[in-house]
Image: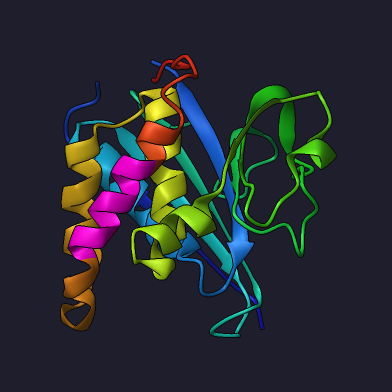
Amino acid sequence: MPSKRSVNCEPAQAVVDELALLIIGIGGQGVQLIGKTLALAATAEGKHAMLAADYGGEMRGGPSNASVVIGSAPLRSLPVLPAADAAIVANHKFTGVVPERLRPGSLLLLNSSIVDPEAAGDAHRVVAVPATAMAAKIGAPQAGGFVLLGAFAALTGLVERDSLVEAMTSLLPPYRRQHAGTNAEALDAGAAAVTDHAALGAP
């Protein structure tokens, strides 16, 4: 049975507006971990964040999606988003290249190692990053999701790099803590890959 969870993270101090993000992929790509990392990093910076997870029972290969909403004030969005302002598509096997709930003109960040950017059309701001290949190149094939997260953070200015590293490290269980260094390297690689794109601005 698919599992759906929502987590509200409300800091004591609010920092204007909000951004709703869809993260789309399959089990084994780290979708849930990067969603949690982003939400935790945002709350560490004094923002409000809400995370919802939607995934199948398979450890690998099944659908794995997450929604993250971040804002500077208490959030208005529901855990199941009717529409989103941005999407990260790590794998389009179960959704297609463009998620149905993505608003026209939104940021669409694609893992071009798997997803063909040409199939995205021209209704969105498409940014292609070969995340799977980049992660393999740095010797961390499990870190493709963090390549995409680093690119997303650089494109939006939503959270700081150091906040992402701290959040990611705190979320890793002890038996995976050895991956913290390469995950951080993947974040940096993703950010570097999109330096030619202007920042969108953040809440």
Q: What residue lies at 20% left-to-right and 83% top-to-bottom?
A: 175
Quadrant housing the C terminus: top left
User: Can you say whether 108 is above or below 133 in the image?
Assistant: above
Q: Tell me, what colour scheme is on the image?
A: rainbow
Report the residue at 40% width, 41% height from top.
Answer: 190
**Looking at the rendering, which quadrant does residue 88 occupy?**
top right
When asked about the image quadrant of residue 24, the answer is: bottom right
For the N terminus, the image quarter is bottom right
Q: Is residue 9 visible?
A: no
Q: Residue 13, image x and y in percent?
A: 17, 28
Q: Does the image show residue 198? A: yes
Which residue is located at x 20 percent, y 31 percent? 46
Along the viewing direction, whichever of 81 and 102 lies nearer the viewer: 102
- Residue 146 location in percent, x, y? 39, 53
Which span is picked out in magenta?
180-189
Tell me where residue 67 appears, x and y as whole percent: 54, 49
Q: How many marks?
A: 0
Q: Is residue 84 above or below residue 116?
A: above
Question: Which sits in the foreground, 201 or 51?
Answer: 201
The x, y position of residue 110, in whole percent, is 62, 43
Q: Is residue 19 left or right of residue 10?
A: right
Q: Which residue is at the front of the view, 155 or 3?
A: 155
In the image, taking residue 137 as reference, residue 94 lies left or right, namely right
Instruction: Check the image and report above or below for 82 versus 138.
Output: above
Magenta span: helix, strand or loop, mainly? helix
